[in-house]
């Protein structure tokens, strides 16, 4: 196949081997957050991008990789215990796979996830409708004026439907594709990102940077090192981009609340000087530079999300030259590096998701050089006094996990309950009661299971959950300094409404609920 050379080549040199050997002493230390394993792709070659979701409705999280050199996708169906079965889905000419992000979303109201990706051979995005079994129907195209390399989904027009935004590397613009309903889409407009900006091969980010209720987006820039921000004005329109100059060669960008102030921030990857620079949002669409995070040679993938379960955003980086994954854990004073985790050859993009729904976030990384996926399984132990039970009602990301951030004890003001696989960027409800419903029931007849018995409980508490862009939620449950609480047991469960891109719950109201969590105060 005659393809363009990827901007990230597979590294196989004596220098690369020396660097890998030099880093072994670091990588072999106790890995405090994850254990790792690899999964094959069943024949797919050069996976650049990866995404997660429950493709067959069994409650288990699945993964999909986009395989650049073989024009197909690999579906990895999970069994909920960390095992995955691969199968291939074709995306051949006139479509063809690209190298950047694709999305798994529900587009037509049938409560089954579909796949949307940029195409290589023709200027279009390709849409493959999911069958609900882990398979996809043949792709159909939405024509665009130029070729794009990656696509993301969000409601830019404010009509309650998920639209698409795709970036064109060769034409320095973004293409907006709006949803018409019923799974139909139409190209709407081209959004210029020309010099001094310029699109890059890396990912871009979507958030409401100025807190006006309209979605904005940001992208790293090519002609001037830094990033550009385009503020949404409603109805799918955007203002002119604003440039923030930073570093020497900026290639990728991710969004998230990096300093826990409730305002979206930007993490910017600079491959020229091998670092990540946080840019902290002020809520008006402007940003201030924060302290940099040093990477190792050839950083490539960048993601922001809570992997440690403490409610703070963490930064995850893949380093393609040394075949490692690095996690910077967010703290009250900044970011602290954890150990390096060994990946496959030339790791690329990253997917979040709790594939065993134990309430601890896991990661998956696409390895373009070794044609496999590295799974990073969260190994944080469930705290003493806490245990999981039940199944809950799953949604687009499978079963919702639940756990606690520490041992429950009197005088623990920082005790919190965490959630995984929740709807992204949403407010949920934490239910706490003193009577358990072990098997789960649907007392409201609303199509979702409750594992707390509200009717029989003499104590009931409802608190807000707040989730990030990868479905990691946190709710603070401060325990007062009252020794008589020792030995008391309560039961907790999360309840959420799915977003417009994730409406896969069997509930007609789009409600998903987590497993139950038994909490005995020590």
Image (cartoon, helix red, strand yellow):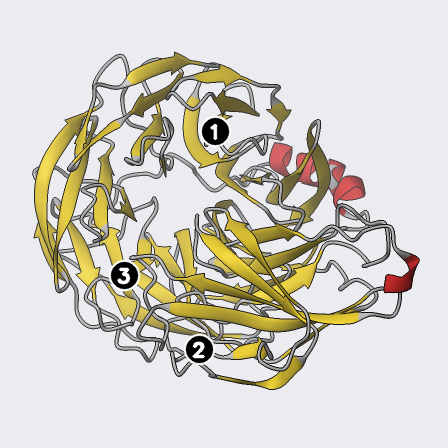
Q: In which quarter of the image is residue 315?
A: top right
Q: Which residue is drawn at 30% across and 57% down?
A: 501
Q: Residue 265 carries which label?
A: 1
- Secondary structure beneath disc 1? strand
Foreground residue, 108 or 416? 416
Dot 2, crowdedness within 10 Å: few (<14), some or many (≥20)? many
Image height of 506 relative to 342, above or below: below
How far is disc 1 from disc 3 in space, using C-alphas? 28 Å
Q: Quadrant of residue 194?
A: top left
Q: Quadrant of the C terminus?
A: bottom right
Q: How many marks?
A: 3
Residue 25, image x, y percentages: 80, 41
Q: Residue at x 23, y 73 (%)?
A: 110
Name the residue carrying label 2. 448
Residue 465, image x, y percentages: 54, 53
Q: Nearer the viewer, mark 3 or mark 2?
A: 2
Foreground residue, 496 or 5? 496
Q: Residue 115 carries which label?
A: 3
Q: Quadrant of residue 359?
A: bottom right
Residue 10 shows in the view:
yes
Q: Which of marks 1 and 3 is in front?
A: 1
């Amino acid at each position: 196949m005659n393809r363009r050379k990827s901007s990230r080549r597979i590294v196989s040199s004596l220098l690369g081997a020396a660097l890998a050997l030099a880093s072994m002493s670091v990588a072999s230390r106790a890995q405090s957050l994850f254990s790792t394993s690899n999964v094959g792709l069943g024949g797919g070659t050069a996976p650049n991008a990866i995404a997660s979701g429950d493709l067959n409705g069994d409650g288990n999280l699945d993964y999909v990789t986009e395989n650049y050199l073989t024009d197909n996708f690999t579906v990895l169906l999970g069994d909920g215990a960390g095992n995955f079965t691969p199968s291939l889905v074709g995306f051949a000419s006139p479509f063809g796979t690209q190298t950047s992000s694709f999305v798994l979303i529900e587009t037509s109201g049938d409560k089954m996830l579909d796949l949307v990706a940029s195409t290589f051979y023709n200027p279009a995005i390709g849409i493959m409708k999911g069958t609900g079994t882990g398979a996809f129907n043949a792709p159909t195209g939405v024509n665009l004026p130029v070729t794009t390399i990656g696509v993301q989904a969000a409601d830019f027009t404010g009509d309650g439907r998920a639209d698409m935004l795709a970036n064109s590397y060769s034409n320095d613009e973004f293409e907006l594709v709006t949803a018409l309903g019923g799974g139909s889409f139409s190209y709407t407009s081209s959004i210029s990102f020309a010099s001094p900006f310029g699109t890059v091969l890396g990912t871009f980010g979507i958030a409401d940077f100025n807190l006006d209720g309209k979605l904005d987006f940001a992208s790293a820039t090519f002609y001037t090192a830094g990033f550009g921000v385009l503020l949404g004005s409603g109805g799918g329109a955007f203002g002119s981009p604003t440039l923030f100059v930073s570093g020497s060669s900026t290639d990728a960008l991710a969004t998230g609340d990096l300093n826990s102030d409730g305002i979206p921030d930007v993490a910017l990857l600079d491959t020229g000087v091998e670092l990540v620079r946080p840019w902290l949002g002020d809520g008006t669409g402007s940003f201030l530079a924060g302290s940099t995070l040093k990477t190792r040679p050839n950083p490539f993938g960048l993601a922001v999300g809570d992997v440690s379960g403490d409610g703070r955003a963490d930064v995850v980086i893949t380093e393609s030259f040394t075949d490692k994954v690095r996690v910077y854990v967010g703290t009250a004073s900044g970011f602290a590096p954890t150990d390096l985790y060994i990946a496959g050859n030339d790791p690329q993009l990253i997917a979040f998701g709790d594939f065993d729904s134990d309430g601890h976030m896991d990661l998956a990384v696409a390895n373009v050089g070794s044609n496999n996926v590295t799974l990073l399984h969260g190994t944080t132990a469930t705290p003493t006094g806490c245990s999981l039970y039940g199944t809950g009602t799953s949604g687009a990301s499978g079963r919702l996990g639940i756990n606690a951030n520490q041992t429950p004890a009197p005088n623990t003001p920082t005790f919190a309950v965490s959630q995984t696989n929740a709807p992204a960027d949403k407010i949920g409800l934490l239910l706490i009661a003193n009577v358990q419903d072990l098997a789960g029931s649907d007392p409201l007849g609303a199509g979702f299971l409750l594992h707390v018995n509200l009717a029989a409980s003499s104590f009931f508490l409802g608190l807000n959950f707040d989730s990030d862009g990868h479905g990691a939620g946190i709710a603070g449950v401060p325990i007062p300094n009252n020794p008589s609480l020792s030995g008391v047991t309560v039961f907790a469960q999360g309840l959420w409404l799915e977003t417009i891109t994730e409406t896969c719950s069997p509930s007609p109201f789009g409600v998903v609920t987590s497993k139950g969590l038994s909490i005995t105060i020590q």
